Image (spheres, rainbow, N blue to C red):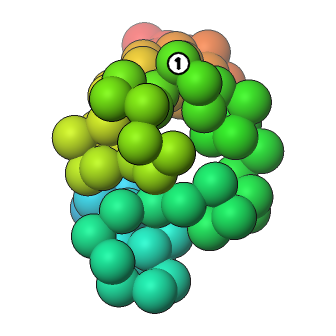
Amino acid sequence: MSKKIIVAALGALFTVAATAGNVFSTLDTDYSGFISKDEAAVMPGLVEKWEELDADGSGDLSAKEFAAYESAEKPAAEAATMKDAPKATK
């Protein structure tokens, strides 16, 4: 695999990681510091896991609770990326 392809792939991965850090802020449209279930509706996977993620039962997700969701989703996303990555050839 050429160095240009490797550099491009790594650049794309870093861009995705940087963007993911801003997801909480993007979802918190009322700037309350929490994500409501209505705000989370744009991410069906998040709503599906709502009861599990809302650890304190407040009805909203704190940044810490949302970080638990991102941590759980990140390995799955990375595995999918690696599965689809081109294989190195000699």
- Residue at 42% x, 20% y is 72
- Is there any visible trace of residue 75 in the rendered image? yes
Label 1 Cα crowd, 10 Å radius (few <14 / some 14-19 / many 20+): few
Left or right of residue 80, residue 57 in this image: left
Q: How many marks?
A: 1
In which image quadrant can residue 8 be found?
bottom left
Establish if 82 lies above or below 42: above
Q: Nearer the viewer, residue 19 or 57?
A: 57
- Residue at 60% x, 32% y is 50
Q: Which x, y percent locates residue 81?
A: 56, 29
* Residue placed furthest toward the front: 58
Q: Nearer the viewer, residue 12 or 72?
A: 72
Q: Which x, y percent locates residue 17?
A: 31, 51
- Is there any visible trace of residue 12 in the rendered image? no
Left or right of residue 44, residue 74 in this image: left
Establish if 24 lies above or below 90: below
Q: Amino acid at mark 1?
A: Glu
- Residue at 53% x, 18% y is 52
Left or right of residue 35, residue 65 in this image: left
- Residue at 63% x, 40% y is 46
Q: Nearer the viewer, residue 35 or 20?
A: 35
Q: Which x, y percent locates residue 21?
A: 28, 59
Query: Where is mark 1, residue-wise?
Result: 52
Q: Which x, y percent locates residue 20?
A: 38, 56
> Which SS class for mark 1?
helix
